[in-house]
Amino acid sequence: MPIEKYSFADITENKMLNIWGQYLSRSPLQLNKMHESDAELFLIGGDKVIAATIDTIVEEITLGFYADPETIGWMAATVSLSDLAAVAAQPLGIVPSVCLPAKDTENFQRGIATGLEAACRHAGTFVLGGDTNQGEQASISCCAIGLTEKTKVRTRMGIKSGDVIFSTGKFGEGNALAAAKLLGLNDLYSEKDFRPIARLREARIICEFATAVMDTSDGLIGCLDQLSRLNQVGIEIATPIEDLVRSKALKVAHALSAPPLVMLAADHGEFELVFSIPSQKQEEFVRTCQSTELNPVMIGKATDINNGIRLSSGRGSLALDTTKLRNLWTDCKGNISLYLETLIKLCSG
């Protein structure tokens, strides 16, 4: 389908963030501009860079995606640590702020603490302190702080036409969980199945080769679309969609009678890293990966044909209406049936 307009400000979330930018000044020590990086980057002397980020988990709790306090704790740490991975920073620690519910407070607190500690142990870092409150609605915000070097920093900027697009893994389990929770498909995918990890170890290798990096917190298509808009390049997905979707997510898609693309196009992600490798470095990158723990998935390539996301197949090329896809939840005003029906139509081509 032809896309008549392709503007960065077409995306509701981008518009919202731009309003903050109209009122809030930025530090002269900050290396990144708004939208350009998963974490905020500050030069602190020499080539040392502090990376800082914060995320809040509340909508996922309200919608019922995360009901187990251990999941909430794990995800609170992981979403922020993943932002550090995307900028090639190693974590110094996290600082959570938790609003505990009025009911079953102690058990909820113990579950949150267990999840936070498990995610931090996996990442080799610690909870440095935090804040505790109590209220009707449970929520948790988590600030992560990391350290890196200016030469190793990677942002969302730097993709050129011809760059090859890779990821640290396959996708879809975030959206599989969302669908299972909203539609009662827990026998196909349960909350216990969902334990994404921050790709901090892989980031050490990626930063030696990549020109740009972003995590898939908002799903693969949302990630690719944001990279495309920021860098003013097209991105062609050359790998068959079925080969990009994790097996459990494929089962959920089949149960919905939905195309597998749905598992990539909705916006509850799984925190893989998507990154661009210059074509002349591709062979060296692949050889390096063969002797390490990184098993990259090739997605496609950047092009200068148009500013958009296209699916390539033997039958030709299909342009995705990513503006509609990324704004769909807001446009549907939380109507789950309308959202799913429209999402499937947009992904059916």
Image (spheres, rainbow, N blue to C red):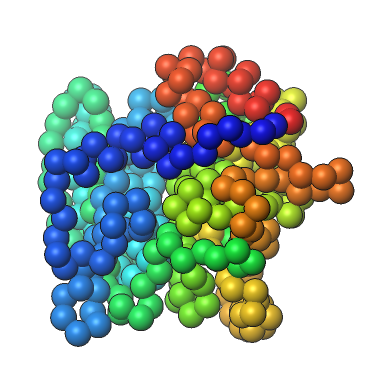
* Residue 269 visible somewhere in the drawing: no
Camera sees residue 52: yes
20 and 97: which is toward the camera: 20
In this view, 12 is above or below 317: above
Q: Position of residue 50 (x, y in %)?
A: 23, 69
Q: In this view, does 223 lie to the left or right of 142?
A: right
User: On the image, which quarter does residue 290 sit in?
Assistant: bottom right
> Relative to 204, is 242 above or below?
above
Q: In this view, does 35 lie above or below 275?
A: above
Q: In this view, does 299 lie to the left or right of 157?
A: right
Please tell me in which quadrant of the rendered image residue 10 appears.
top left
Q: Total marks drawn? A: 0
When asked about the image quadrant of residue 345, the answer is: top right
Q: Which residue is drawn at 65% across and 53% down?
A: 305
Q: Residue at x 61, y 57 (%)?
A: 304
Which residue is nearer to you in this view: 33 or 123?
A: 33
Give percent across and percent down for residue 154: 40, 69
Q: In this view, does 274 lie to the left or right of 61?
A: right
In the rendered image, the quadrant that contains the N terminus is top right
Q: Is residue 33 left or right of residue 291?
A: left
x and y, in percent, of residue 57 in the image:
32, 38
Query: Viewer-proximal residue, 137 or 265?
Result: 265
Seen at 23% across and 79% down, the residue is: 48
* Relative height, residue 255 to residue 57 (above, below): above
Front residue of 290 and 61: 290
The quadrant of the picture occupied by the C terminus is top right
- Furthest toward the right, the residue is 314
Indicate the position of residue 328 as horizontal and vertical percent values: 50, 26
